[in-house]
Image (cartoon, grey):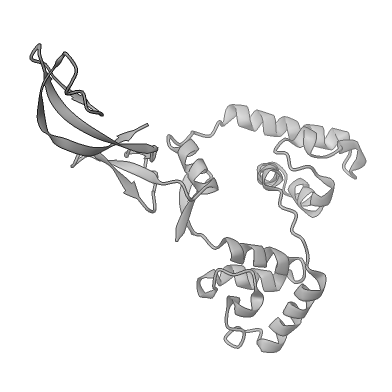
Amino acid sequence: MSDYKIICGILMKVDKKPELEKLIEQVRLIDPVAAKWIEDNKSVCQNTDFIGTAFSWQASPQGEDFWVDILEKLLHQQPQVDKKPNLERLIDEVRSIDADAAKWISDNKALCSDINALDDAFPWKQTPHGTAFWSNVHHQLTSQSQSNPRPRHEHADLATEYFNDPAIIIQHFDIHHAEWVDIEEPTFSPNKKYRKKPETVKLSLRYYLNKTGDIAFANHDISEEDYFKKWLGYWQEVEIEI
């Protein structure tokens, strides 16, 4: 199964292995080099957060004894991953201004709030850099954002919603058949129309002719009504969007 992320304004296709990602984060707290090897070799790994079945230890350059040691450390330490996605976005933005400043934030995530706003992420005056330093970085970030606004992808909101909830069914409009069609792996191309599949309800309908000569339909028996003249066709099951 695949997923899509918008990275630097470009929609990128990525493999969805959420359990493996959890394992990588756990291993990173013990051995960053080992975690990087797993990350670089996702294609040969199973989507599991248990290192014992994630991949073939013997087939790796490190060998079986190395991974046995990692497994023992995982079982004893059971590290908890502190996920701060908003802070990660802030770090990426700061990196474009000052790589050393971004590294300090990355190395001190425990002291930071999960906020994509430099002036609220951590107390500037309590850092070795001081308030004046961070104020300057903040000013550069603000100026860069105002002078170089990123173009917004027309399907950004829908793509983000789908990424956060893969259970959502996405449809694209098939221009050849003039209908909305379910699609398993949407690319969210700018030249196509997409939507979240709406909820539907099934109804029993039947066309009839009224006494004024008009054709209408009913969802229940109206043959005793004064305006009814005769049925046209049979009862049909139809699915209507709500």
Give the side of residue 1 with respect to residue 211, left or right.
right
Q: Give x and y (percent) for residue 183.
A: 34, 50
Q: Which image quadrant: the C terminus?
A: top left
In the depicted view, which residue is nearer to us: 169 or 228?
228
Give the side of residue 207 with respect to residue 121, left or right.
left
Q: Which image quadrant: the N terminus?
A: bottom left
In the depicted view, which residue is nearer to us: 62 or 1?
1
Q: Give x and y (percent) for residue 215.
A: 12, 20
Asked which quadrant contains residue 112, the reply is: top right
Q: Give x and y (percent) for residue 134.
A: 81, 36
In the depicted view, which residue is nearer to us: 62 or 181?
181
> Up-down: is 58 above or below 205?
below
Residue shown at the point (43%, 34%) measured from the top left: 154
> Up-down: is 40 above or below 185?
below
Give the side of residue 130 with respect to residue 150, left or right.
right
Asked which quadrant contains residue 80, the reply is: bottom right
Q: Residue furthest top?
A: 212
Residue shown at the point (71%, 88%) measured from the top left: 65
Asked which quadrant contains residue 28, the reply is: bottom right
Residue 197 in sight in this render:
yes
Residue shown at the point (76%, 73%) measured from the top left: 74
